[in-house]
Image (cartoon, rainbow, N blue to C red):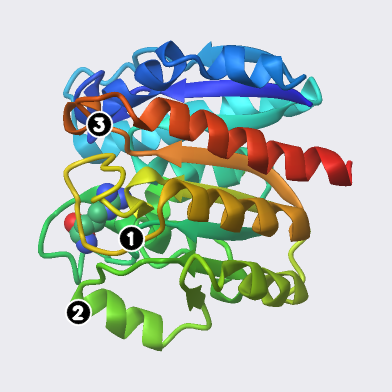
Amino acid sequence: MKLTIILAPYDSGYYHGGCGRGPDAIVAGGLVEELTLHGHDVIVVDIGEIGNEQGREISTGFAVCSAISEKITASRKDGRLPVVLCGNCLTAVGAVAGESADSIVWADQHGDLNTPETSTYGFLDGMALATVIGLCWRPMANAVPGFKPLEASRCMLVDARDLDAGERHTLEGLPILHGTCAEAPGLADRLAAAGGHRTHLHIDLDIHDPEVLQANRYAWPGGPNPDELRESMRDVAASLPVVGITISAYDPAFDAKGDVPPAVGRLLVDVLDALRKKA
Ligand SMILES: NC(=[NH2+])NCCC[C@H](N)C(=O)O
């Protein structure tokens, strides 16, 4: 397949800090070589440093989304599937916008369904999925080229086991599909029935069982091992019209042995293989 790997090396307004170091580390771990070996035609583009002198988390976070949307638009013109490596989950807002996605799979240890009214952390990424479905930050999100909020019924949350009280409440009131990694392929059929034609696949690497693979500071027990995640996401990709992928939130400081980059390579090889077989 023709692919563009797009790097968004930011974490909460910080360029190349924390999870902002993840995209480069994943590429340094051999991702391009691995995908090329499996027959893909890969180019890499980096959004670079986004001009925001004040370094504000919120405005920088959305500026990153706009940059991603623009890179994806260029990539689509070239017939390339975008694979975004990002430090922040909020960056998925830019991917959904650039891809004109109408549905989403959100595989994450967290729900990211807080809003400014429910967050007790003040962490923008904890509101990322809420932003995607139009629950908050609307003026900022609407300024991202191509952004349209997705319907909650076209959203599937996978293995979000660390949910805050406000998020549980939000989830109860919305028709979001929600299940474990093992249940995801079955839920994908229900997501397909909800009528989306362009699905974005978002994977926060902290979905993994932290006892097996720890991607960042969050280490809620449970979750899939890399084989289980790969199998689940491959089946999900086989049954949904995936138009782009975000791989988010790898902080190399929590992965002393460098186990995460090769796991990302294997995950993408299998997901892309499932998409290629359908093409
Ligand atoms: N994408 C993430 N890393 N999300 C973590 C969110 C943690 C917590 N629920 C919060 O709102 O701050």
Res 112 label: 1
Residue drawn at (56%, 68%), measured in percent from left and top? 155
- Look at label 3 and name its amino acid: Asp
Residue at disc 1, CB closer than 8 Å to ligand 1: yes
Check contact, mark 3 vs mark 2: CB within 8 A: no
Q: Which callout, 3 or 2, points at the residue further toward the start of the chain?
A: 2
Check contact, mark 1 vs mark 3: CB within 8 A: no
**In the rendered image, the vertical position of residue 219 relative to residue 152, given as above or below:** above
Res 165 label: 2
Q: Which callout, 1 or 3, points at the residue further toward the start of the chain?
A: 1
Check contact, mark 1 vs mark 2: CB within 8 A: no
Distance, label 1 to label 3, CA atoms, is 18 Å
Query: Which one is in front, 80 or 181?
Result: 181
**In the rendered image, the vertical position of residue 258 relative to residue 44, given as above or below:** below
Res 93 label: none
| Left or right of 6 in this view: 269 | right
Query: Which one is in front, 137 or 277?
Result: 277
Residue located beneath label 3 in the image: 251
**In the rendered image, the vertical position of residue 176 relative to residue 275, given as above or below:** below
Give the quadrant of the C terminus.
top right
Q: Position of residue 121 (x, y in %)?
A: 11, 57
Asked if residue 51 shows in the view, the reply is yes
- Look at label 1 and name its amino acid: Asp
| Left or right of 121 in this view: 1 | right
